[in-house]
Image (spheres, rainbow, N blue to C red):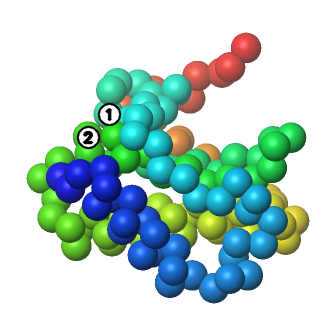
């Protein structure tokens, strides 16, 4: 796995490939956190969150979790990591752009993410736990 400094450079390089319009109203920008982020609803310690798109009173931001990449791609080379960063970054930007466009429902990325979680639980023979 590459070090944090090189990871940050890969993220910056991937950001540079995106059109400026993608960054509209993303006032928190794209940040990298050193932490690994395990999914709170995971069945086992096998489901890491690689990136998030957050909206709150402070604004909108994309976060990529270096530690999650390191834990899941420990033996990957730079090119493999760059491809995964590209995938995750564009996924989070799709959340941002869908939010700005008002896209919701069955064809949204949120719906796709929910289906992925259902598939994950089914793979483990579980049903999604209900939150209180």
- Location of mark 2 (residue): 71
Question: Crowding near pointer 2: few (<14 within 10 Å), some, many (20+)?
Answer: some
Q: Quarter of the image holding residue 79?
A: bottom left
**Image position of 72 (left or right of 31):** left
User: Dividing the image into 4 quarters, which one contains the C terminus?
Assistant: top right
Q: Position of residue 74 (x, y in %)?
A: 17, 48
Which of the two marks, 2 or 1, is nearer to us in this view?
Answer: 2
* Residue occupying the point 38% across, 35% down: 36
Q: Furthest residue to the top?
A: 132
How many numbered badges does the structure rendering display? 2
3 or 90: nearer the viewer: 3
Q: Position of residue 97 (x, y in %)?
A: 74, 69
| Element assignment for label 2 | helix
Q: Furthest residue to the front?
A: 5
Q: Quarter of the image holding residue 95?
A: bottom right
Ranked by sequence position, the earlier of labels 2 and 1 is 1
| Element assignment for label 1 | loop
**Image position of 99 (left or right of 112):** right
On residue 24, which mark appears?
A: none
Q: Furthest residue to the left?
A: 75
**Image position of 53 (left or right of 118):** right
Identify whether 47 is placed above or below 10.
Answer: above
Q: Position of residue 12 (x, y in %)?
A: 46, 69
Q: Taking the image as drawn, is residue 93 in sight?
A: yes
**Image position of 15 (left or right of 9):** right
Identify whether 93 is placed above or below 3.
Answer: below
Question: Crowding near pointer 1: few (<14 within 10 Å), some, many (20+)?
Answer: few
On residue 46, which mark appears?
A: 1
Q: Position of residue 62 (x, y in %)?
A: 61, 54
């Amino acid at each position: 796995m590459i070090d944090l400094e090189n990871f940050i450079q890969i993220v910056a390089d991937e950001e540079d490939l995106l059109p400026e319009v993608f960054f509209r109203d993303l006032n928190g920008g794209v940040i990298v956190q050193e932490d690994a982020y395990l999914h709170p609803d995971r069945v086992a310690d096998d489901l890491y969150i690689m990136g998030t798109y957050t909206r709150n009173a402070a604004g909108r931001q994309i976060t990529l979790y270096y530690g999650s990449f390191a834990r899941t791609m420990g033996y990957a080379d730079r090119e493999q990591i760059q491809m995964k960063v590209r995938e995750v970054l564009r996924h989070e930007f799709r959340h941002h752009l869908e939010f700005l466009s008002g896209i919701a429902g069955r064809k949204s990325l949120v719906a796709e993410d929910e289906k992925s979680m259902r598939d994950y639980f089914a793979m483990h023979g579980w049903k999604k736990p209900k939150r209180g």
